[in-house]
Amino acid sequence: MRSRHSAGRRCLTCEGPLWRGDALTELADRREFRARLEEVLAFAELTHGKQSDRCTAVMLLDLDRFKAVNDSLGHPAGDELLRKVAVRLRSALREQDLPARLGGDEFAVLLDNPVTRDTAASIAARLVDLISRPYMIDGSIANIGASIGIALAEPSSTLDDALRRADLALYKSKADGRGRFTFFEPSLQTAAEARQALEFDLRAALALGQFELFYQPKLDLRTDQLSGFEALIRWRHPQRGLVPPDSFIPMSEELGLITRIGEWVIREACAEAARWPDSLTVAVNVAPSQFSTGSLLPTVQAALAGSGLSGSRLELEITETALLRNGPDVMKQLQAIKALGVQIALDDFGTGYSSLTQLRSFPFDRVKIDRSFADDVQIVRAVTALGASLGMCVTAEGVETAEQMLRLRGDGCTEAQGYHLSRPVPSSDAVKLIHRYLKQ
Ligand code: C2E
Ligand code: MG
Ligand code: MG
């Protein structure tokens, strides 16, 4: 049975629909949702004080991994999935509550009566659970999840306030790993303001020349020679100080700035490495979204041509997220880059979902064992043996002690990198390190 809201509002005189609602799912659409919320908030203001522990609850709900299903099973299957989500949403709510599809894979729920925080929490938990159960679509099983942000509207809340708060809570659910619900709280607003300020500064950073590359040496354990450096970006901000990459690379990806930042990194690293002895390589990290514009290959070509660095002295480090997110197209780009003589390394090995599958999917030149395994003798041994059998070099990251270094050597690991050798250093100090090593 369709809920009384499913076909939109009815005109009082002719009984015809005033709004048609969302055609795909027959839930309310954004317009109807906003109108109902506005009405409910106005009513809540009138009745304020009578039920003070109860509030109007607005939930914004985004599907997790919907895009992957859409991409792999096709758009008609994606549409079918959205319809099934709508059915589940409706089944979990009371007749008088209002579920809506705001667009794409964004849904919203307005609970008809004021509720306590506990009630809102238990409804949200039920929705997360229900939507995360597998779907059968065209004979295939689709698995998605749901992230929810909840705003408990205060009586004086405006429509936009309530939606903005629910949106901030939704953002937090996603940032915390998805598949969960979060209530709005004022600290989320403060965090959003800080994020906005960071975003503003980050957009200007490249033009202001605020990025720098630090270089961390890598030691060839078979020859005890310096084999090269990994280039690691830093953002030198006049007030924030030296900002580490983990604090701005994800945001650069989100904002679509990473392609240009990544281009700068590749150009700068190649120019720097061209000044080092020929035996030394430079490794550059490539973010997953750098594969999405198709500009990586020309960037690498231009950086090599501009610096005169031979392709074999450049190594690109990619993570398995890049392989998973972009599928076969990434493989093609990697093949073309590899054809320039550039080495390709799989970074942070062991931290993802399907590292072993990824290892087979492309002829990597190198595997870098994530530093979280530096002390795990069995893992290091197993990966070293695996790398050897696949003809790949194996680098252990995060080597902090002489003891770890000794063990790696014994286990046949080919390269070591970590604080025990040196922390990442500015380019001028990298040159000093080179002289020191070459003298030995
Ligand atoms: P990563 O590529 O795995 O780089 C290694 C990270 O481990 C570096 O952190 C390095 O400073 C740190 N590290 C090295 N040796 C040790 C050690 O012995 N102990 C410990 N605890 N840590 C060690 P950093 O420089 O903060 O970089 C973090 C991540 O940011 C990098 O991880 C990489 O994924 C990303 N990143 C850095 N530069 C770039 C860049 O230019 N582009 C992109 N897309 N990502 C970058
Ligand atoms: Mg790396
Ligand atoms: Mg790594």
Image (cartoon, helix red, strand yellow):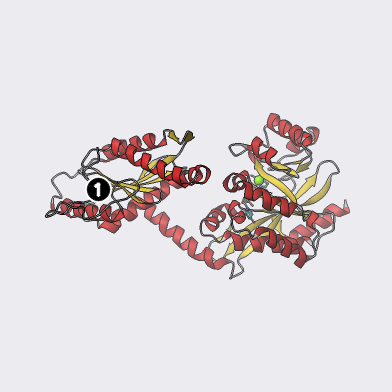
407 to the left or right of 117: right
Label 1 sits on residue:
7
What kind of element bears circle 1?
loop
Q: Is residue 428 visible?
A: no
Position of residue 237 measured from the top left corner of the image (x, y, whole percent): 56, 64
Q: Quadrant of the N terminus?
A: top left
Q: Is residue 245 visible?
A: yes
Mark 1 CB lies closer than 8 A to ligand 1: no
Position of residue 113 measured from the top left corner of the image (x, y, whole percent): 20, 43
Tag 1: amino acid: Ala
Q: Residue at x 40, y 48 (%)?
A: 105
Q: Residue at x 11, y 55 (%)?
A: 13
Position of residue 27 measured from the top left corner of the image (x, y, whole percent): 29, 46
Outermost residue toward the bottom in this view: 208
Badge 1 density bin: few <14, some 14–19, many ≥20, Cα 10 Å = many
Q: Nearer the viewer, residue 198 or 394?
A: 394
